[in-house]
Amino acid sequence: MATLSDPPRESFQLSMLLNDTRYRSYTFQFIALFILIAAMAYLGWNLVQNLAAAGLNISYQFLGEPAGYDINQRLIEYTSQSTHWRASVVGVLNTLLVAIVGCFFATVIGVIVGVLRLSNNWIVRQLMSVYVEIFRNVPVLIWILIVMAVFVSVLPQPRDFRGDDPAASMFLDLFAFTGRGFYLPGPQFSAGFAANGVGWLIIIGLLIASFFSARALSNWATKTQEATGDRPVTWYYTLAIWFVPLILACIVMGLNWDIPALKGFNFQGGIFARNSLIALTLALAIYTAAFIAENVRAGILAISKGQTEAAASLGLRPGRTMSLVILPQALRVIIPPLISQYLNLTKNSSLAIAVGYMDLTGTLGGITLNQTGRAIESVLLLMLFYLTISLSISFIMNIYNNSVKLKER
Amino acid sequence: MKKTVILGALTVAGLAAGAAAAATLDDVKARGKLNCGVTTGVPGFAEPDANGVWQGFDVAVCRAVAAAVLGDSTAVEFVPTTGKTRFTALASGEIDMLARNTTWTFSRDVDLKFEFTGVNYYDGQGFMVPAALGVSSAKELDGATVCIQTGTTTELNLADFFRSNGISYEPVPIETGSEAVQLFLAGSCDVYTTDASALAAQRANFPSPGDYVVLPEIVSKEPLGPLVRHGDNEWGDIVRWTLNALITAEELGVTSDNIGELSAGSSNPEVNRLLGSEGTLGEMLGLDAEWAKRAIMAGGNYGEVFATNIGVDTNIGLARGLNAQWTDGGLIYSPPFR
């Protein structure tokens, strides 16, 4: 017969750090952390010492000095007299432009290819396999160079549009597709109050208002359907909500089109999408789309076949089965690897200099680094910028992931 | 995994130790090889030939220094560098000297802590356009698309030139010269701009060189020369005076043909000092008496090096122009050997 009593409370002894499983893991983690910090400190100290020995120092003063070089694609005001910092910001915006447009097209292509890889049609299925295998097994830099080379050599150059009997002509007299890029008609507003971008703010405001109105209409239709069983026909209301305010605003603000025309060496006027931007975005999009397609295929295959059969027995057609039953569930599997692909695309965009696109690596990590010779400072700043962009993408996509993932209650 | 980390740390520490050491001459002698930074390939200036042996105008400077220091003009490890990597390679000690079409500027000399040891080619930035464009002056280039090799002084000169003339342009920055040439030939840019010597060098490789013209404007001064790190003046002196020896040799008429008989002694005391039969100039440099003789024998004097690599009889076809000896109205001028 044993009596139960509390075990004697041991006082803490130093040997418990090694012998007691409760503390041992902390001990080793602490040692590992200490070694890591010591190693980093040693390398950092070494760097500072060697810079000092060479008479150099770490200084970010160069960011405030005039850059002295020009950048072709500027989303914000920039001249060669602007500072190196502003040149870096121009680079960041160019990187973001490629990343956002590239991710959008990669997703669209990737989802379509991924779904078609599971098609019942043998030819379509095999074609999509060939696409995926070719694009994901050749380095992306090669794709960027190939797309650019094809672009430059296949499309006519501005000089072909010149002369009495030109070798090339403008499409519909509105669009010029040249090896230097696409020249498109640019909308502009003639009314005085719409100057300086105010017109664009009005348009964006209207589009947001239309979006919410259309959604409210759709919600109302769903509620009516749930209450009465009949869904009211709303498509012409929706069309009106989207287009009537837009058209009215355009008429009031005096919308007209700035059509590109050949003047001197190049086309002038309108919107100019440079060959470097198009080639880079296209190459990154089709390359990343091959990976996304595989993610999508994996996601769809992860949904049990019973779901498809159940949907079929309810009378849903294959298209509706895919969009209403399979894809919403597959998204849970697709989204996490999709985030990685977005990050990959963004980081791969640093290959932009291969086609002369002035992204962050081209401005801060390229010309600025070279002209100032501040390699360590520039590279550290470059890492910081990419880290910020990547973490932001991760953050936003994780919010989305939380909204679609399986809710466990 | 752990091993790699430790090895990596050791490598970093080793590199750092190398950079901190001052006596480059001792390092080079101990290694038995000169690490010389060159371009990744500019015809005539530095390019491997069909047998993989580096040849060219800048390469000749490396070989002359190796011959002077090590007695063997082939004891050179050529390290190809891009416009981006060249300064880091030199500052970190990866290379002992850089002979790579590098423009001598104030900030590179002072702020980046390098020492330019002279000028082996006086260049200037020029423009090349297709003859069919009918352009006769760079000031007519308003609105043109211009291909530039990025990471050089070129893009700054270009921005300054267009700004001071109040005309606009569309820059297309390209990483390497060969890619820029491709875009230019495809018609993706109207103008290709870089140093006039490189324009001539690259035009020589075009399918039909006659269809392209180099515009008369030279928009910058580009004194190109070899450079070393700050802080090791003895090593800087060796590179500087090796280049000067080549220049002086041409001025005094010392060629690779007659150097054998001249080194036995001649009536000109400066030739004797240069070739080591008189005075102790080699000793002052920390080398032996025949250092300059070997440097000249490596590829000939400055004029011979120029003629074999980039002169009028080569594909590149550059005239001496500014790079003639001062006695012929050029700028090539060496301080006296005494």
Image (cartoon, rainbow, N blue to C red):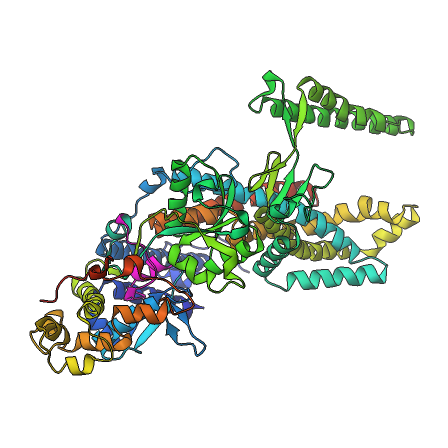
Is residue A114 at all visible to an observer of this figure? Answer: yes
Magenta segment: B84-106
Depth order, front residue of A280/A71 = A71
Could you tell me residue A404's position as x and y percent? 69, 43
Q: Is residue B112 left or right of residue A405?
A: left
In which image quadrant can residue A42 be found? bottom left
Could you tell me residue B326's position as x and y percent? 21, 59
Q: Is residue A162 left or right of residue B52?
A: right
Q: Is residue B30 magenta?
A: no
A19 lies above or below A393: below
Q: Residue at x 52, y 52 (%)?
A: B130
Image quarter of the N terminus of chain A: bottom right
Q: Is residue B136 left or right of residue B64?
A: right
Depth order, front residue of A92/B279 = B279
Q: Residue at x 42, y 34 (%)?
A: B166
Image quarter of the C terminus of chain A: top right
Could you tell me residue B308's position as x and y percent? 34, 72
Q: How many marks?
A: 0
Q: Is residue B105 magenta?
A: yes
Could you tell me residue A333's position as x and y percent? 69, 52
B317 lies above or below A109: below
Is residue A380 at all visible to an observer of this figure? Answer: no
In which image quadrant can residue A126 be found? bottom right
In which image quadrant can residue A401 be found? top right
Depth order, front residue of A264/A319 = A264
Spot the residue most to the left: B279
Main SS, magenta region, reads: loop
